[in-house]
Image (tube, rainbow, N blue to C red):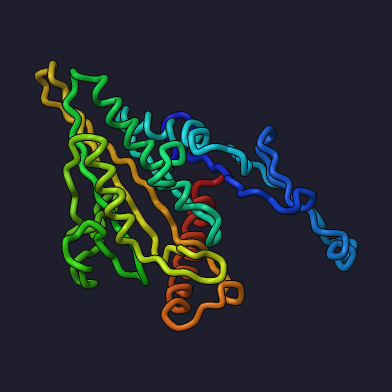
Amino acid sequence: MQAVRERLTVAVRARSVSNPDHIQIRPASSTVRVVLPPELASARSDNQRSSWEWTYDHVFGGESSQEKIFDETVAPVVDAVLRGYNGTVLCFGQTGSGKTYTHTGSTSQFAQRGVAPRAIARVFSHAASQPQYETLVTASYLEIYNDTLVDLLTELPGPGPESLSLVDCESSTTVRGLRAVAVADEAAALEVLFTGERRRSVSCHQLNDRSSRGHAVFTLSMEFRSRVESSGRVTRAKLVFVDLAGSERLKKTQTSGCLRGESVYINQSLTHLDQVVVAAAVSRGP
């Protein structure tokens, strides 16, 4: 969600394509075109399409850097949050498509850090450049695993289902019992982020050797107070990063047992998200 200029922007990041004749990534025109191979197209009746094209706000090919992704899609959201708006960055896609890499990136290569660490750096850089304001930041990290809420920052191995609960307010939904950690600088915020990352539920299957088995929600809550004004006015804003578990086809992942059950929960929740998005679009109108 990008505040002020546009309420919602959609960006597509594609990994390197093995057959560019069939899947055409076009960053210049922000389009993606899919063309059926001739052997498949010839098997379709005359009134059926053999190619599709979609247009997005941004399209990035496999050569696009982490820095470019952040600068063009996430930095405007962070800047809007620093002006007092709420903003959300949501990573969605098939399992193994690179969502967590885009979100967190590499912890061993600075240039490969993801959009969340870069956003943290931008928040505290801005705070340092605005000494006339006191900036207070707290961080929380939630995982939704098999429809159960899990606090990734708890000291315990894992809370039971009764430990966290959803509370509906007039204009928002909060998680009662979720720990919020005060972070005074970039290093402290990164420690919270990476602590949560290490505690996420992951497993391996045919399509991904580190498949996230739950949806993760990392939130930075901010308060801005003027040091020079006597009004006592406080501006509050939230920056939310959502790293969704990837959609999975059981035939391709070849999972069984617990992994298969996790896949069912993942796919069901993504279907519900799709229904919510469609309903919201219909109610909003053209």
Spot occupied by residue 42 in the image (x, y as percentages of width and height): 90, 64
The residue sitting at 90% across, 62% down in the picture is: 46
Does the image show residue 107? yes
Answer above or below: position of 144 versus 77. Answer: below
Instruction: Looking at the picture, tell me which residue is in the foreground, 228 or 143.
Output: 143
Answer above or below: position of 263 versus 115. Answer: below
The residue sitting at 32% across, 27% down in the picture is: 83
Which residue appears farthest toward the front when viewing the image? 108
Instruction: Looking at the picture, tell me which residue is in the foreground, 257 or 210.
Output: 210
Left or right position of 132 against 142: left
Does the image show residue 59? no
Spot occupied by residue 218 in the image (x, y as percentages of width and height): 32, 50
Which residue appears farthest toward the top when viewing the image? 228
Answer above or below: position of 40 versus 258. Answer: above
The image quadrant that residue 286 belongs to is top right
Spot occupied by residue 243 in the image (x, y as percentages of width and height): 42, 54
Spot occupied by residue 283 in the image (x, y as percentages of width and height): 50, 51
Instruction: Looking at the picture, tell me which residue is in the foreground, 107 or 214.
Output: 107
The residue sitting at 54% across, 68% down in the picture is: 248
